[in-house]
Amino acid sequence: MALALDLARDALGTDDVPVGAVVLGPAGQVLGRGRNRREADADPTAHAELLALREAAAALGTWRLEGCTLVVTLEPCTMCAGAVVLSRLDRVVLGAWDPKAGATGSVRDVVRDARLNHRVEVVGGVREAECAALLRDFFAGRR
């Protein structure tokens, strides 16, 4: 989570929402990194999670990320939760829950929907206060 938090802080430099994500391989090695880049790239899909998943898939040479873990500072949205399921990740470790748009257990639970062919373990609240404070401070400066 420390690396994901560092990536989230990097997003502040481009006025992006400070969210960072890391994909870890089965042995704990870093396979992919991402931070929100929607503002920087003018790309609505440039969420930290998707960028980390793309980098991990490229590193492994396959879209199947079985045995891997996504570590992210904020609970994934519906788009990112869908990508988590489609990439066949084993688990998501998240910092802060997202009571407005979360899709891994708070508002929705896309990753554990019994109708899908793959379900993902979710571990929430890791360094939650630190992750939430980063987001709270970012949005407080905009209101």
Image: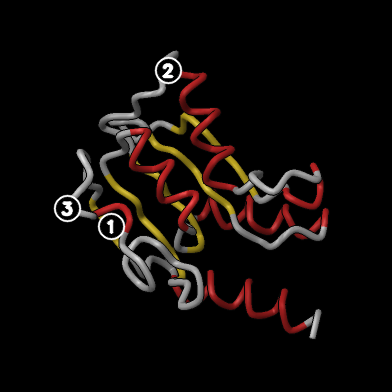
Marks 1 and 3 in Cβ contact (< 8 Å): no
Residue at 20 percent across and 38 percent down: it is 117
Residue type pointed to by label 2: Leu
In what quadrant of the picture does the C terminus appear?
A: bottom right
**Mark toward the start of the polypeptide (1 vs 2):** 2
Q: Eyeballing the image, is 48 above or below 126?
A: above
Residue at 51 percent across and 60 percent down: it is 73
Q: Which residue is mark 2?
A: 60
Badge number at residue 114: 3
Cα separation between marks 1 and 2: 23 Å
Q: Residue furthest left?
A: 114
Q: Residues within 10 Å of mark 3 (few under 14, many from 20)?
A: few
Residue type pointed to by label 3: Ala
Residue 70 picture quarter: top left
Left or right of 60 in this view: 16: right
Give SS at disc 1.
strand
Q: How many marks?
A: 3
